[in-house]
Amino acid sequence: MRFTLVYREDLDDFRPLADQMFSDRRRQFIERLGWSLDADTKGRELDAYDAENPLYLIATDEEGNHLGSTRLMPTTAPTMINEVFTDLLGGVAITSATTWECTRFVVSASANRRVAPAIMWAGCALALRSGVDRYVSVTGTNLIRVFKASGWEPEIMGRSESEEGEICACLWEVSEEQCEKLRRRARIPEGTPAPRIHLREPVAHQSAVAA
């Protein structure tokens, strides 16, 4: 398994992989989970936050095929938890350079059980290297068991009903101990270097990924 870190503004250099990622998002969120999201004419699921220069953490197989991914954005930039799901936190915004939002966590239908904890390990290791001390996210309550089984159970900060069922605001604390737990769960060899990238300031874009 390999990891790729790429900002949206550089995603054109990874076009086949990006198309696989957005197609897997459609299959997971629209087709399997039944979320009320849109897909473009190429069958890719994108939203307004893909236009805000997020950082994508992508797991691939040895041939470079998409196995799973997630979208990361500092809470100092526009985020779903602060703009779309404010009711989950009683209208209180989370805004900190050391707190990042994690959204669109997706695992390919062809992936094995190591992929989810491996992506979590990579995200935790990236945070430790980058001065990020927690992640926040909004997810379906039914998916908490997936995160728990993968080895990183979040703290629930708030719950609410939606068209897709009960959703919750989650907080994941980052630590060396947590990172090691995820590494063992994903069976990643000890000493494997974590993915690295120079973190950039958020740069807003006016359109989603080009057709």
Image (cartoon, rainbow, N blue to C red):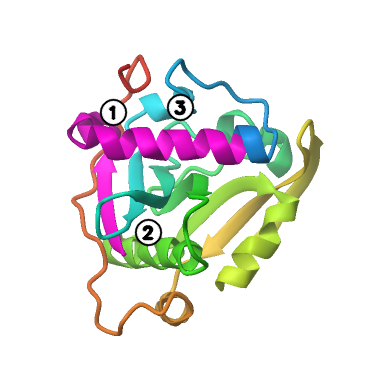
SS at mark 3 in the image:
loop
Q: Which residue is mark 3?
A: 44
User: Which is nearer the N-term, disc 3 or disc 1?
Assistant: 3
Q: Are marks 3 and 1 in contact (CB under 8 Å)?
A: no
Q: CA separation, marks 2 and 3? A: 30 Å
Identity, as a three-letter code, of the amino acid under mark 2: Val
Q: Are marks 2 and 3 in contact (CB under 8 Å)?
A: no
Q: Is residue 163 above or below residue 189?
A: above
Foreground pick, 141 / 101: 141
**Where does residue 50 sit, x and y in percent of width and height?**
40, 29
The spot of residue 96 in percent (x, y) is 44, 47
Secondary structure of the residue carrying tag 1 is loop
Per the rendered image, the range of residues in magenta is 1-29
Point 74% across, 53% down: residue: 142
The residue carrying pointer 1 sits among few (fewer than 14), some (14 to 19) or many (20 or more) residues within 10 Å by Cα, namely few
Q: Residue at x 48, y 54 (%)?
A: 110
Q: From the image, which quarter does the N terminus lie in?
A: bottom left
Question: Which residue is disc 2 drawn over?
Answer: 132
Q: Position of residue 172 (x, y in %)?
A: 54, 62
Among numbered discs 2 and 3, the one appearing first in the sequence: 3
Residue 192, by quadrant, is bottom left
Pointer 1 residue: 203
Residue type (three-letter) at the residue carrying disc 3: Arg
Closest to the camera, between mark 2 and mark 3, is 3
Check residue 175 for magenta coloring: no
